[in-house]
Image: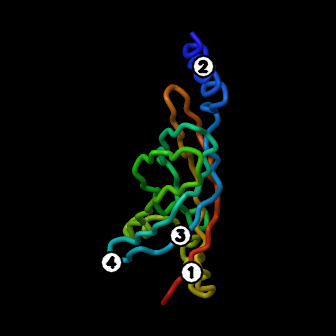
Amino acid sequence: MNGIKITCFLFFLIFTSCKINEAPTFIKIENLSLIRSTSKHIILGGEALFNNPNLVGGKLVIKGIDVSLNQVKLGKVESEDFKVPIMDKFTVPFRVTVPLSDIHKVEKGKLMEGIINSFLKKTINLRFKGDIIYKLFDFSTNYHVDEEKEVKIIL
């Protein structure tokens, strides 16, 4: 009889102290760097930093984050769905592919101004804007990302 009471108490304690409806906290975008540049495209890589205070994991889905320079859209963030670790800070790796053919189609004045300024300063400021989705069972929430990051240009 005591074994059943102890089991019920432990079961109650575990499920009442476990936060499962609190989404992981988005902290920042970091480690943004140039991975590769070819005659057809530029590939950038980086990480989105989060903290999960929960005793349960979940899944993060990064879709629909636009990358722009001087308000001109250059590309979208690409990432695999990511399994969230329990009670830990973690990073979600991502890539951005910028097709050079698309750059020629955009408003040339804004883009050229941004490129010239970037080469003079030897840095480029990219804006990341969109949503990251956290899913756990039937619970889901969106993080709105609107962040500017500076990338150093190495010639």
* Distance in Å between CA atoms under marks 4 and 1: 20 Å
Pointer 2: what residue?
6
Q: Residue furthest top?
A: 1
Residue beneath the point at 50% across and 38% down: 58
Q: Residue at x 38, y 77 (%)?
A: 37
Badge 4 local density, few (<14 within 10 Å), some, or many (20+)?
Answer: few
Mark on residue 40? none
Residue where numbered disc 4 is placed: 39
When the figure is inspected, residue 15 is found, relative to residue 116, above or below; the finding is: above
- Residue 28 location, quadrant: bottom right
Kind of residue indicated by mark 4:
Ser
| Three-letter code for the amino acid on which mark 2 is drawn | Ile
Q: Amino acid at mark 3?
A: Leu
Q: Position of residue 41 (x, y in %)?
A: 36, 71
Q: Position of residue 97 (x, y in %)?
A: 40, 64
Question: What is the three-letter code of the residue carrying label 1?
Answer: Lys
Q: Is residue 87 above or below residue 124?
A: above
Q: Nearer the viewer, residue 107 or 121?
A: 121
Q: Secondary structure at mark 1?
A: strand
* Gap between marks 1 and 2 measured at Cα: 59 Å
- Viewer-proximal residue, 87 or 135? 87
Q: Which residue is mark 3?
A: 32
Which numbered marker is on residue 152?
Answer: 1
**Is 152 rendered above or below residue 58?**
below
Q: CA distance from mark 3 to mark 1?
A: 9 Å
Q: Secondary structure at mark 4?
A: loop
